Amino acid sequence: MQPVHPGSVKRCRTEGFAAYSVAFSPFFPNKLAVAGSANFGLVGNGRLSVLGNGPAGVGVEKVFDTQDGLYDLAWSEVHENQLATASGDGSVKLWDVVLNDFPIRKWHEHTREVFSVDWNNLQKELFCTSSWDCSIKLWTPDRPASVLTIPAHTACVYSAIFSPSQPSTIASCSTDGLLKVWDTRSPTPPSSSGLATPSIALQAHPTEVLSLDWNKYQPHLIATGSVDRTIRIHDLRMASSALPPSANPTAPTLQPSATVATLLGHEYAVRKVSWSPHSPNVLASASYDMTARIWSMDAASLGGAGAGMSSFGAAGMGGARLEKIYDGHTEFVVGAAWSFFEEGVLASCSWDQEVHLWR
């Protein structure tokens, strides 16, 4: 396992605001943004911070303050200066970082905290949000209301993310322990249970699933992080696209287990997982144990399994190996994002009000 040399780490403080989420710009190699909340996000204001990364270090270039905490953000895939934020008051805001003070759009349809926001990198005018109100919503910047609402889970939807290869496919995870996959082209009306019917539903973990991410090169693979302290890799090819018949058609139907690897090592809940944009077999994670970690998977295992089978299990921990542990933060590490332009560079953010760049 390779150490992270402390002298190679760049640090930036988000003074007064616990950092909840960090994201690199897809347009500018040296620009990042951070979503933050006062008082650890429990009560108080929020702040969107725009950071610049230069030879002298990372610094705050601009801030936008909000009346409630910010939990997540996503850069626009269309406009290089715009990004969306997810807020604790149920609102979704669109910002232009060139302008001052106020968002350029604001929507308020969610009835509880908005916990995630993700921009579609294929159908670039779309982004989605997920909320404690159990729903997923799809939006476009030019419309005054959401374009689709999916009643997705029975509890908080911690994350909803578009597939990197199918623009109409979204995966979501929730307090209910489920990983669900949705086809937004043919939304299913709510059943008698009040929930829409997903194309795939997997029992990803026995308890709350806090984060998920699609593999950018093998889009049949999804990583999930949970309160149970584990990271699991799921192969969607092992889940049938056709739901088996049920005696009770309104009852939720779960597919057989598609978990092909379980990564052990974090000591507390795993708050964030993120596949590398540069390598199909590298994964980052962030945890309440105050560490961020980098894992590698056996490349042959990733690509060698056919539908209905997997070669992950051939090596311990499904062919996965812990490569690095970064313990430079002093509070919960809740966000992690890879640089798109500089391979191997990871940004981690924490309730210690700091963003760290390291490799």
Image (cartoon, rainbow, N blue to C red):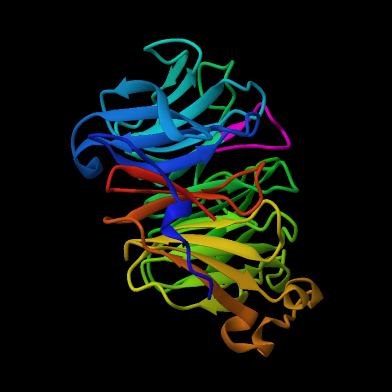
Task: Check residue 289 for magenta coloring.
Answer: no
Nearest the viewer among 78 and 23 is 23
Pinpoint residue 323: horizontal percent, then vertical percent.
55, 71
Q: Which residues are magenta?
A: 118-127
At a point 57% along the width and 33% down the height, the residue shown is 30
Task: Check residue 124 for magenta coloring.
Answer: yes
Q: Give left or right: position of 322 versus 106.
A: right
* Residue 139 against residue 17 in the figure, above or below: above
* Residue 318 against residue 141 in the figure, above or below: below
Pinpoint residue 140: horizontal percent, then vertical percent.
59, 24
Q: Give left or right: position of 169 versus 283.
A: right
Pinpoint residue 244: horizontal percent, then vertical percent.
66, 71
At a point 66% along the width and 26% down the height, the residue shown is 125
Pinpoint residue 6: horizontal percent, then vertical percent.
41, 57
* Residue 338 against residue 26 in the figure, above or below: below
Nearest the viewer among 231 and 342 is 342
Q: Is residue 193 visible?
A: no
Nearest the viewer among 306 and 76 is 76
Magenta stretch prevailing secondary structure:
loop
Q: Quadrant of residue 316?
A: bottom right
At a point 38% along the width and 13% down the height, the residue shown is 102
Q: Is residue 106 visible?
A: yes
At a point 51% along the width and 13% down the height, the residue shown is 98
